[in-house]
Amino acid sequence: MTLSLWLSLVAVCMMGAMSPGPSLAVVLKHSIHGSMKNGMLAALSHGVGVGFYAAASLLGLGALMLQFPTVYQVLVYLGAAYLAYLGIKILLAKPSADELQIAQQSGNGKQALQDGFAIAFLNPKLAVFFLALFSQFIDPANLTFKVGMIMCVTVFVIDTGWYLLVAALTEFSKKRFAFTKPSPWLDKLLGIIFIILAIRVVISL
């Protein structure tokens, strides 16, 4: 792969990572409600999920999903259901300013890892996206392991790097504007956003 071709791939991946959507909402959720560490854990596991689809697309999973649209639709609906679940969970949570509860939320790294990976893994559109994207940069007949690794690592680094930056900027904003206590209205807004995203995922099918 030439440098110019790789830079083109980087540019497309950056635009894809920076586009707002469910992934951004999940990282913000854990960064705002928990800590920068939780936001970064969500970013890291999300990058793993995206990297999985990038690798799977090179192995033909994207094409397989197009041949079996029922499997594709099931995964999309599962993703929408997960988004709705996160939204409802936030809306039904009892608001509390108790410092112990905040500390417990801040240490819930396992949930951050789960949500970050799930929101990527339950988005089969990534497989189709990478299938379409990679087809513009490689010739399947001449694809080598080295080129495939470069492409997958590029996708992982860009996606993870962007959401790590989002988590860091969120933490900076919390400290800069003294936004350290839970806000009921912000919680409700975040929950509603998740539900709206879930509806949008279903409608876009």
Image (cartoon, grey):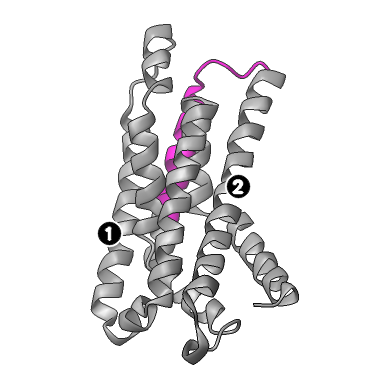
**Which residue is drawn at the image coordinates 64% and 77% (left, top)?**
1
Q: Amino acid at mark 2?
A: Gly
* Residue 196 against residue 57 in the figure, above or below: above
Tell me if residue 200 can be seen.
Answer: yes
* Residue 100 against residue 59 in the figure, above or below: above
Q: Amino acid at mark 1?
A: Leu
Residue 154 at x, y = what percent? 58, 61
Residue 102 at x, y = what percent? 42, 15
SS at mark 2 in the image: helix
* Residue 60 against residue 199 in the figure, above or below: below
Farthest residue, direction right? 4
Location of mark 1 (residue): 78
Residue 12 at x, y = what percent? 65, 69
Magenta segment, principal secondary structure? helix
Disc 2, disc 1: CB below 8 Å?
Answer: no
Location of mark 2 (residue): 161
Q: Quadrant of residue 36?
A: top right
